[in-house]
Amino acid sequence: MITPEEAAAIVRQHVRVLPAERLPLVELAGRVLAERVEGTEDLPPFSASTMDGYAVRSADSGDRRLVGDRFAGRMDELTVGPGTAAYITTGAPIPDGADAVVKVELTSESDGVVRIEEEPPAGHNIRAPGYDLRKGELVADVGTILNPASIGLLASAGRVDALVGRRPRVSVLSTGDELVEPGRTPGPGQIRDSNRYALLAALAGLNVDVRFAGLAPDEEDAQRAFLTERIADSDVLISSGGVSMGRKDLMKRLLPELATVHFQQVSMRPGKPVTFATVEGGPLIFALPGNPVSSLIGFELFVRPALLSLQGAGWPERHRVRVRLTHATKPTPRTDYVRAVVTRDREALVATATGEQGSSRLASLAAANALLVLPPEGAPYKTGSIVDALLL
């Protein structure tokens, strides 16, 4: 067996960033930027008010005579001289002569005279040219996962589109004659297929193109033909089940025929049988265990970062924090990924496991917001022990 860190490194070595495509702003959410974008002008290009109020000279004091209005989107001729003020709206250019803005709540106006309750210093409530973005300044770099703010920055910089990594084509398949669709009543020895739907939910928000999601045939020749078809149509193939030691674990038997297998066991709990393979010029293949929690934790550790990496995002892992255990727990011979709830207690983050940790018990993961990372230890982890946690 190899360690989870070694397994992740092997997967990362085999990721090849997919070709890029140019998309309009409205289609960029969550996509990975494939070009460097710099500002082409100062934003704002002029000194602007950050408040509704009155533009004044900070060197003056006392009441001011109103000389006009300045509204956003207008640059009409207006000058603020000694002892005067101009009404101004948020975002409007500062009139010539003014060097401060008093917000309207600190003023009163009567018969063309403005009374100032609190004299402002120079520069007060003024956004200088280039405050939001300077010409030549980096807006977003290659590998940025575009969020609403970064897309807004692109729009502010005058971009109407951007070059981003192509969406990976993904096939998701479950194996096993015992599986039936969720809407069916299981017969003797059968169970409903939960893994496929859990994995599809895990894919949501990762900007992938799901080309197939369904059950694979559970007979050797039929499954071989089916896998060959899916390999030809996918950038990533994700399966669940069929990777243990049983006579009907066909994925374990067929993958060495169809692909290069890089690892078949990882020193982790749950998820030991997770398997990774590649096809030259073809997809990354993740054969995940059939137990539901094992399948999802394998996805979190290896599949999720690989999918983002294919789009050009490096190797983005879940945020890792240090937490204090609220209870003792026994170590295992493998790195244990314990489902837990992390909360804040005064200044510390504390973690509590979500009950029984069996690899078939999805409820333990549904209730969790983190995975505790517990390497093998000679002695039990005591209450108060400080450990790593991956925030989900």
Image: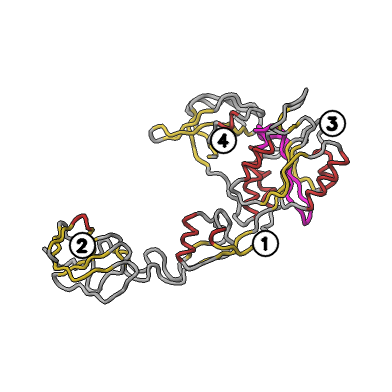
Q: Amino acid at mark 2?
A: Pro
Question: What residue range appears in magenta?
Answer: 267-295
Quarter of the image for the N terminus: give it.
top right
Q: Tell me if residue 109 comes above or below residue 350 in the rendering.
A: below
Left or right placement of residue 285 versus residue 108 in this view: right
For mark 1, what is the residue?
A: 19
Q: Amino acid at mark 3?
A: Arg
> Marks 3 and 2: in contact by CB < 8 Å?
no
Asked where in the image residue 17 lies, by quadrant, the reply is bottom right
Closest to the observer, 179 or 260: 179
Instruction: Please say if the residues under marks 4 and 1 sit with CB atoms less than 8 Å apart.
Output: no
Q: Quadrant of residue 35?
A: bottom right
Asked whether 276 falls inside the magenta stretch, the response is yes
* Three-letter code, disc 4: Leu
Of the numbered discs in the image, which one, if any, rests on residue 371? Answer: 4
Q: In terms of sequence position, does the residue under pointer 2 or pointer 3 come before the other?
A: 2
Disc 2: which residue: 121
Estimate the spatial distance between the alpha carbons at disc 4 and disc 1, rounded to whole Å.
33 Å
Q: Residues within 10 Å of mark 4 (few under 14, many from 20)?
A: many
The picture places residue 142, in percent across and down from the top left corner, at: 56, 61
- Contact, CB < 8 Å: mark 2 with mark 4? no
C-alpha gap between disc 3 and disc 4: 32 Å
Neighbour tally class for label 3: few under 14, some 14-19, many 20 plus, Cα within 10 Å? few
Badge 2 or badge 4: first in the primary sequence: 2
Q: Earlier in the sequence, mark 3 or mark 1?
A: 1
Way the structure is coloured: secondary structure
Q: CA distance from mark 3 to mark 1?
A: 40 Å
The first of marks 3 and 4 along the sequence is: 3
Q: Residue 29: x percent and y percent?
A: 54, 55
Residue denoted by label 3 = 247
